[in-house]
Amino acid sequence: MNAPGTPRPVREDPALAALAAAVLQGDAAPRRRAVAKSITLLESTRPDHRERADQLLTTLLPHTGRSFRLGISGVPGVGKSTFIEALGLDLIARGHQVAVLAIDPSSTVSGGSILGDKTRMERLSMHPQAYIRPSPSSGTLGGVAEKTREAMLVCEAAGYDVVIVETVGVGQSETAVSSMTDMYTLLQLPNAGDDLQAIKKGVMELADLVVINKADLDPHAATRAQAQIASSLRLFGLHGHPDPASHDQPLWHPQVMQLSALKGSGLDEFWQRVMRYREIQTANGQWAARRRQQALAWMWDAIHAGLRQRFSHHPAVRSALPALTGAVESGQVAASTASRQLLGLFTGESGGRPPLSV
Ligand code: GDP
């Protein structure tokens, strides 16, 4: 029997059941089409699509969670797509299956795209063991990351065992990426060390691994940058460990390394570090703890977004809003009073009383 509130099982919807089966079957070409179709369904804003999307997600969910989720960010031009393509092809050669999802904050605002053009990662995107999805073209309720989180689950269910989530380093999206991945990697240019101020402190604090790309261009600058970034990372200390003083568990220290995505040098070392990170975080329990926290944070983000939307569409709130916002602006009603009034209308706790007359 279904738990209360769980979506109807997909078997009641043959087309959806077929879609779920195609995602799960693991046969390269039909699987890629099914993954693309599923993600399109998840991105739809139509309520009937949303209902089917929830059914699909619930069916796929038991098959998710087993991939390694790698977050990568960096400013435009740092070499993200060159790096991801080289790494992706390398991983496929070692027997992995790789999905790449993008969070593009520019698409939320303008419908335009810093990351979405189709020519990026051409070789990887054509590989049958890879799946690349540009970012959704319009903003979503739960912020830039909501659809990407769902897309990630579809990719995992389809058997992609490395899911790379990529974003441009221009704001909130770095936090979004680190909050949905197992490891967050920041790409830097060799001259970054000369101007450490330019690296946003908050972003640096999120990084589990900083990679200085294009080391081939200026090896000296890259080495200088590595030393400077390493010392600032030491200041930020240990990652995600509640008590750095307890040394009975292995701990991961954020690291910095250099490579050249264009020449393909350093990719092996990069993956070795990723695997070491995974080992340590699994052994000390941080891996599972991070995933649990992320799932709950995702739920709360979605609740807050849903509440905001319901609030702004609520008929009583909408009709009282112009007068109350005017009264707050002109100083006749305190902001806190107005907010209580509006929330009362929203929850029905105002008992049908009209809002304070202004
Ligand atoms: P993105 O905007 O971060 O995705 O950056 P791209 O991957 O598109 O790279 C921007 C430019 O930098 C391209 O012309 C790449 O060929 C070049 N590039 C990327 N990685 C390297 C590298 O390791 N060394 C050198 N010399 N150039 C690189």
Image: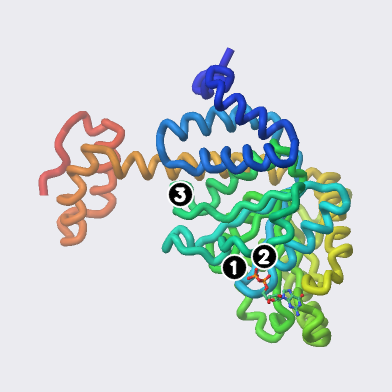
Q: Is residue 242 visible?
A: no
Name the residue at 57% across, 40% down: 37
Find numbered disc 1 in the image and state the secondary structure of the residue it sits on: loop
What label does residue 220 carry, if any?
none
In terms of sequence position, does the residue under pointer 3 or pointer 1 come before the other?
3
Q: Residue at 74% x, 68% y: name it.
A: 210
Indicate the secondary structure of the residue bearing disc 3.
loop
Residue 264 sits above or below residue 295 on the image = below
Q: CA distance from mark 2 to mark 1?
A: 14 Å
Q: Is residue 76 visible?
A: yes
Q: What's the mark number on residue 205?
A: 2
The answer to which of marks 2 and 3 sits earlier in the sequence is 3
Q: Which residue is mark 3?
A: 140
**Residue at mark 1:** 169
Residue 254 in the image: state x and y as whole percent: 78, 63
- Residue in the image at 73% along x and 55% along y: 183
Q: What type is the residue that disc 1 sits on?
A: Gly
Separation of residues labelled 3 and 1 (CA atoms): 19 Å
58 displayed left or right of 28: left
| Callout 1 crowding tier (Cα within 10 Å): few <14, some 14–19, many ≥20 | many
- The location of residue 202, given as percent across then percent down, is 61, 66
